[in-house]
Amino acid sequence: MSLRMLARSSTSLRSMARSAIPARTIGAVRVPQVSRTAAPAARAFSSSSLRADEFENPFGPNSLYKLTEEEEMLREAVRRFAETEVQPLVAEMDEKEKMDPKIIKGLFEQGLMAIETDPELGGAGSGFLSAILVIEELAKVDPSVSVLCDVHNTLVNTVLRKYANEHLQKKYMPSLSADKLGSFCLSEPGSGSDAFAMRTSVKKSEDGQHYIINGSKMWITNSGEADFFIVFAQGDPAKGYKGISAFAVEKEMGVEIAKKESKLGIRASSTCTVNFDDVKVPVENLIGEEGKGYKIAIEILNEGRVGIGAQMVGLAQGAFDKAMAYTFERQQFGQPIAKFQGMQFQMGQIAAEIEAARLMVYNAARLKEEGRPFTKQAAMAKLISSQVAERAAGKAIEWLGGQGFTREQGVEKYWRDSKIGAIYEGTSNIQLNTIFNLTAKERGF
């Protein structure tokens, strides 16, 4: 089932002429290919601030679970893809610490790698919550696949959509929609939480036709399979963070993929050191303006944090679902262990925490779609969801007892994968600092 087709099947597009448009099969469902040029009757996916009005009902505002038909269909399609295509390969990919190329190919074929990209550039033209739903559903089965999809959509594609000029968008986004994986190069050995302490340098060539990049990036997701890189580099250390610029860089320009990290979790997701040794980048590959890279990084990471929140919620739900099913199968003292009140209390607590984390993630996503401030909500969503994911996965191991401690059941993988949630795209301490500063500011301090 393809997102590109789902994005064109929403009932919000019924006012458009469908009779002349051929239908395509999405899984077992045939839906028409519909252009998104006309205004929808209900809501097209965008950052429109009209969503609240469009969804108003006689009983008051809608819940955060109010999804369009298109979003519901998308979630079900991704769920089937994850269960049928990803699930059989999870253990093998984790063991080999390598993403199966068939998974990446499948993600592109399903239209899941250009969720918000304009249809004219090969994308689905859907909204941010659609991306969040995809990330969540994939994480229920394998958080490694989820983060690959997340980084490509919420960081790489979004940087180009929001900040690149039309030339760069037309040059790169069609291939990023079709078959080329992207990577986001910000962190360095000496600049993690202090991202703007970067030492990767950039200067213009003598003829003024190229930028020349030198340095190394570290902890770079997707780098092992990527052909395209968003690279941040310092052009004038004297200006501090205002000397940083962002560039669109192709692997064939001379990007070297160096050490691949052997990790505790999300092992199938490649995390490598990326080296730049006099890499020449055409001047037209500057993204935005010189010295504005810091602004791009700050703004884009807010969206990325909502994506990581969705990944952690999906992870928690996946671990919970597997463990709960086991508690109804496993019998002790003549009854399923799920019948013991002590177990019920624990499962009820985790269920409530997952629900709370999910609503925080959805709220941040809807705020972003509505064009409203969401930085604090993104930080809160990432913080809480990462904590809930670790607790849920840990409890799931305990509920399975000895079986949970083995690799055979696949539950321990969720716990290993959960640990990264408190680290990447801003550590938990960075999120707490952001939450405090914005809360204090709101109160006039």
Image (spheres, helix red, strand yellow):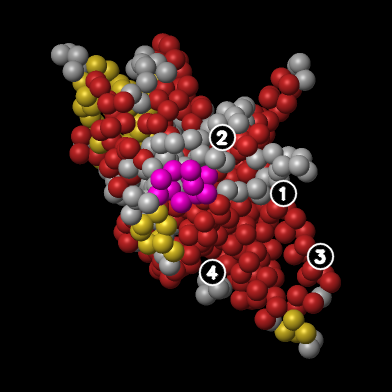
Distance, label 4 to label 3, CA atoms, is 24 Å
Nearer mark to the viewer, of 4 and 2: 2
Q: Secondary structure under badge 3?
A: helix
Residue type for callout 4: Gly
Residue drawn 24% across the image and 20% down it: 283
Distance, label 2 to label 1, CA atoms, is 20 Å
Residue drawn 73% across the image and 40% down it: 61
Determine the residue located farthest toward the left in the rendered image: 207
The label shown at residue 369 is: 2
User: x%, y% of residue 26?
Assistant: 40, 61
Distance, label 4 to label 1, CA atoms, is 25 Å
| Left or right: 36 in relation to 42 | left
N-terminal label among 4 and 3: 3
Nearer mark to the viewer, of 2 and 3: 2
Q: Secondary structure under badge 2?
A: helix
Residue ID for mark 3:
345
Residue ID for mark 1:
356
| Residue segment shown in magenta | 8-18
* Residue 81 higher or lower than 60, as above or below: below
Query: Few, some or many C-alpha atoms within 10 Å of disc 1 (few <14, some 14-19, many ≥20)?
Result: some
User: x%, y% of residue 289?
Assistant: 37, 17
- State the count of labels: 4
Q: Does the magenta stretch include residue 11?
A: yes
Residue type for callout 1: Ala
Query: Looking at the figure, which quarter contains the N terminus?
Result: bottom left
